Amino acid sequence: MINDATLAESIRRLRLGERATLAQAMTLIESRHPGHQALSTTLLDAIMPFTGHALRLGITGTPGAGKSTFLEAFGMLLIRHGLRVAVIAVDPSSPVSGGSILGDKTRMTELARSDAAFIRPVPSSGHLGGTSQRAHELMLLCEAAGFDVVIVETVGVGQSEIEVARMVDCFVSLQIAGGGDELQGIKKGIMEMADLIVINKDDGDNRPNVAIARHMYESALHILRRKYEEWQPQVLACSALEKRGIEEIWQTIADFRSALTASGRLAQVRQQQSVEWLQKQTEESVLRLLFTRTEFDRYFHQMLQAVKNNDLSPRTGLRHINEFLQHQYFE
């Protein structure tokens, strides 16, 4: 474990891309131990000048879309192009230990064995939407360690898609055809967030279904307002199992990056992401501090009990809490 005495040496080793040191740094960042907070902050401040050079990708998709198979095929393609790839796979938390179930790493065996790749399963820890609270900081560590492409894979459950889309450069939605999921994807607004839609499992008897789904997505994209005026979202098909269509996906992502970089939009997007991250973390920090005040915690639970007993409506309970806050802390 990284400590005060080894911090400088650990940063040097991290900059050299040592995977064991990167894993230790991630463990430190994820730690909730109060004694680790100052050290992790110092570590992040030290690496900031070495961040921002990687392509940040978000990958999400419906259950059964083949995300792990796709990520392995995609990651190995990038490695053949001479790139180093880091994958932050946000796993559902174990209901027993609270840790990551680690399913994705066991399914990406070839990628996990490569010296040019690093896979980190991260527990969602019950966070809204399933994405890790620390995913943004883990991306920074990967960038400081010299990885060229950093991928955040989400569990693909609603709110997590929005969270990932707001922390990456390019957001890729992996879909499947033939089960009605293409219509569900259009209804839940995924079209407005995705920079690229990829329909997987374009093989065997499923190819006609993929062609139909691709046409449906393309038609929907043309009537929606663009996320960026510099980029028209694309719909591509692939077979991750047969490793077909993967090269075209990578080229399209590269085109997306070039278009947004040339216009200056990518720099603006990253600045906004940093601001949103700070705002969100500030809100969570303030809430934690508030609940450490004994008088507020006691009053809050009194309101909870009153609402639970149907003595107060939730709205009235909220009004009382707001009045308490105003009187106690802001007068």
Image (cartoon, rainbow, N blue to C red):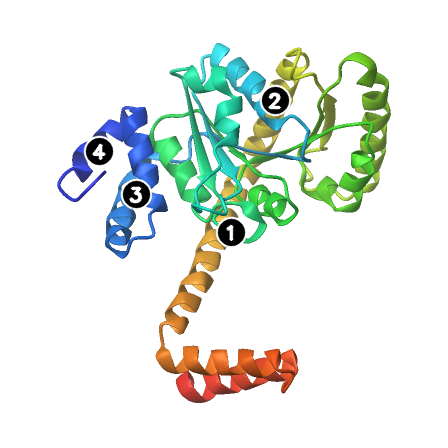
In the picture, the quarter occupied by the C terminus is bottom left
| Residue 53 percent coordinates (x, y) | 42, 30
Q: Which mark is residue 28?
A: 3
| Residue 37 percent coordinates (x, y) | 28, 53
Kindly tell me whether residue 28 is visible in this rendering: yes
| Residue 282 percent coordinates (x, y) | 43, 61
Dot 1: element: loop
Dot 4: element: helix
Describe residue 209's horizontal placement relative to residue 28 as left or right.
Answer: right
* Residue located beneath label 1 in the image: 126
Query: Label 1 sits on what residue type?
Result: Gly
**Which numbered disc flags the more N-terminal residue, 4 or 2?**
4
Query: Do residues under tags 2 and 1 come within 8 Å of each other at their CB atoms?
Result: no
**Which numbered disc flags the more N-terminal residue, 2 or 1?**
2
Quadrant assignment, res 193: top right
Number of disc labels: 4
Query: Label 2 sits on what residue type?
Result: Phe
Alpha carbon distance from label 4 to label 1: 30 Å
Describe residue 257's horizontal placement relative to residue 236 as left or right.
Answer: left
Residue 30 position (above or below residue 174): below
Alpha carbon distance from label 4 to label 2: 33 Å
* Residue located beneath label 4 in the image: 10
